[in-house]
Image: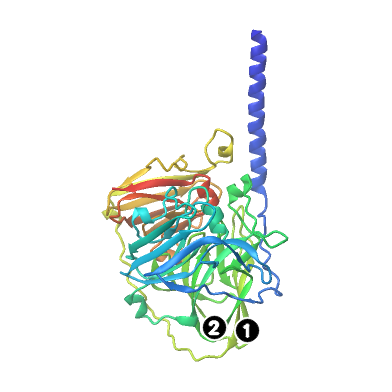
């Protein structure tokens, strides 16, 4: 009997060992796969649908309803979506610095949700903490003073376990703050100021959204083969021979875009997540990861009527993505006299000195394919921990200035987002080993490619309560790559 027990024990051990070996081999093979699906916005016969612009509403008095709806993602076909006010993207909220937001929100979904005001300094009970849920059929009033400088912020749901699916299915929109400093620059406005939210989708044969992530999708993040702009697949925008201002949002769950013009022309970066840069920066390409925004100017003044130029994503090196593809088309369709002159300076960036930091914190990002096995933690961790809403991971003193060092030791990109604060990127080591144009200003989300380490500095608000910081690859976030900090 003793020998039988020992044999059974050894047999169970061998099963466990073999299962672990098989799992490691399967995950290793998956991580070597070329990106799937591959965006197929390559045909010049596409890009015949006009770009849609979401309606603009005043943030001082508005009503929002989250509900199931339908949208023409592909022209002539109705796709079931989740939407704010039956619009994908949701309405663009416009408000001035110093005004008070007042939005009455109704959840008409069949599930719980909430709203996160991405990039804004808001009270903890308004920020969309993952477990602060507005139940199906319930109302909530969002009301807080807008203390952020002029910039393109955005809003989206943030409920634990449903952020990725709800945002992917259409729940997101722009939040535009304006102030006197920005207004004095007379930047392109009206028809010449265009918000563009870029996302990627998978559609079935009936043009319905697919969202059923596998373990491989969780490792890479959910990647689609249809690139949509403002909710429409492969659109075009008719432009005049003059400067245009584009507020660009990467609203994808996981896809990174290396923005460029198809003719290789320069464009100007004038702003980032947290508003204007100190001066325009001329670039030929710009990386934009999920959650990040870029404020850019494109000058169509030198092109003749009939010229067609594409906004595209240039290739870049990454294990799970990085192929080149087109995003949308610009078609020069009329001559106009230019009234705008590019300023040499834009804003004053009040920098923070690392010597003034009250605290320095370090965070290590890891991705472990074995972490998804039964009884083990998530595959994606911060300091070897996964999200627990009941646990406070970091205590922050109200009004404190802190330096955070974040290191990506995994072989996947991680766009890291901190709620309720804007930060400055001091340096990047490893990988690209330098800062990019948008990192010359205030940020709330920063991309770490594999092997990169960034040092950031920020001054926290005096709003007490619990907030989160996390990877804005939404599948990574929901796999556990999110921690809690509390301002005291």
In the picture, measured across the screen, residue 407 lies left or right of residue 39, that is left
Do residues under tags 2 and 1 come within 8 Å of each other at their CB atoms?
yes
Q: Is residue 69 visible?
A: yes
Q: Residue furthest right?
A: 205
Colouring of the image: rainbow
User: Could you tell me which residue is drawn at 30 percent across and 51 percent down?
Assistant: 464
Q: Is 463 or 91 nearer to us in this picture? A: 91
**Quick one: SS at disc 2?**
loop
Q: Is 427 or 56 nearer to us in this picture? A: 56
| Image location of residue 417, percent across then percent down | 44, 55
**Quick one: SS at disc 1?**
loop
Q: Residue furthest top?
A: 1
Q: Is residue 171 visible?
A: no
| Image location of residue 101, percent across then percent down | 36, 66
| Image location of residue 137, percent across then percent down | 48, 55
Q: Is 38 or 482 nearer to us in this picture? A: 482
Which image quarter holds the N terminus?
Answer: top right
- As drawn, 2 above or below 322: above
| Image location of residue 2, percent across then percent down | 64, 8
Mark 1 nearby-residue class (10 Å; few <14, some 14–19, many ≥20): few
User: Could you tell me which residue is drawn at 37 percent across and 56 percent down?
Assistant: 126
Task: Look at mark 1 in the image and give the residue it sits on.
Answer: 307
In the picture, measured across the screen, residue 375 lies left or right of residue 123, that is right
Task: Look at mark 2 in the image and give the residue it sits on.
Answer: 300
Question: Disc number at residue 259?
Answer: none
The image quadrant of residue 118 is bottom left
- As drawn, 63 above or below 460: below
Q: Residue furthest front?
A: 137
Which circle's residue, 2 or 1, is located before the other in the chain? Answer: 2
């Amino acid at each position: 009997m003793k020998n039988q027990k020992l044999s059974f024990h050894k047999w169970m051990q061998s099963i466990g060992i073999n299962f672990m070996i098989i799992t490691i081999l399967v995950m290793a093979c998956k991580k070597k796969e070329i990106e799937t699906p591959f965006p197929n916005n390559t045909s010049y016969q596409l890009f015949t649908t006009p770009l849609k612009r979401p309606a603009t509403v005043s943030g001082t008095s508005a009503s929002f309803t989250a509900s199931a709806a339908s949208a023409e993602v592909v022209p002539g076909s109705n796709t079931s979506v989740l939407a704010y006010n039956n619009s994908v993207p949701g309405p663009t909220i416009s408000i001035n610095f110093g005004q008070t937001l007042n939005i009455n929100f109704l959840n008409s979904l069949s599930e719980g949700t909430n709203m996160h005001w991405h990039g804004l300094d808001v009270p903890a009970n308004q920020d969309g903490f993952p477990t602060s849920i507005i139940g199906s059929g319930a109302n909530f009033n969002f009301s807080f003073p807008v203390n952020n400088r002029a910039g393109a912020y955005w809003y989206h749901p943030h409920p634990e376990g449903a952020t990725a699916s709800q945002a992917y299915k259409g729940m997101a929109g722009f939040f535009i703050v304006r102030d006197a400093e920005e207004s004095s620059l007379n930047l392109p406005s009206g028809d010449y100021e265009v918000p563009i939210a870029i996302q990627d989708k998978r559609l079935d044969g009936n043009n319905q959204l697919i969202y059923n992530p596998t373990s491989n999708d969780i490792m890479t993040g959910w990647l689609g083969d249809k690139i949509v702009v403002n909710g429409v697949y492969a659109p075009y925008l008719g432009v005049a021979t003059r400067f245009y201002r584009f507020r660009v949002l990467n609203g994808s769950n996981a896809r990174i875009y290396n923005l460029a013009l198809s003719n290789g022309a320069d464009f100007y970066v004038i702003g980032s997540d947290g508003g204007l840069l100190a001066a325009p920066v001329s670039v030929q390409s710009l990386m934009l990861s999920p959650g990040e925004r870029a404020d850019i100017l494109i000058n169509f003044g030198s092109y003749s009527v009939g010229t067609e130029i594409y906004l595209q994503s240039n290739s870049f090196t990454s294990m799970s993505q990085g192929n080149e593809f087109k995003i949308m088309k610009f078609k020069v369709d009329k001559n106009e006299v230019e009234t705008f002159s590019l300023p040499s300076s834009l804003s004053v960036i009040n920098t923070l000195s690392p010597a003034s930091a009250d605290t320095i914190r370090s965070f290590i990002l890891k991705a472990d394919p074995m972490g998804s096995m039964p009884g083990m933690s998530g595959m994606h961790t911060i300091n070897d921990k996964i999200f627990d809403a009941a646990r406070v991971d970091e205590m922050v003193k109200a009004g404190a200035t802190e330096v955070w060092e974040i290191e990506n030791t995994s072989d996947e990109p991680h766009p890291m987002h901190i709620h309720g604060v804007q930060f400055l990127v001091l340096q990047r080591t490893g990988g690209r080993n330098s800062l990019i144009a948008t990192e010359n200003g205030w940020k709330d989300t920063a991309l770490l490619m594999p092997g990169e380490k960034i040092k950031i500095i920020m001054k926290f608000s005096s709003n007490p309560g619990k907030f989160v910081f996390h990877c804005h690859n939404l599948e990574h976030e929901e796999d556990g790559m999110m921690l809690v900090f509390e301002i005291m």
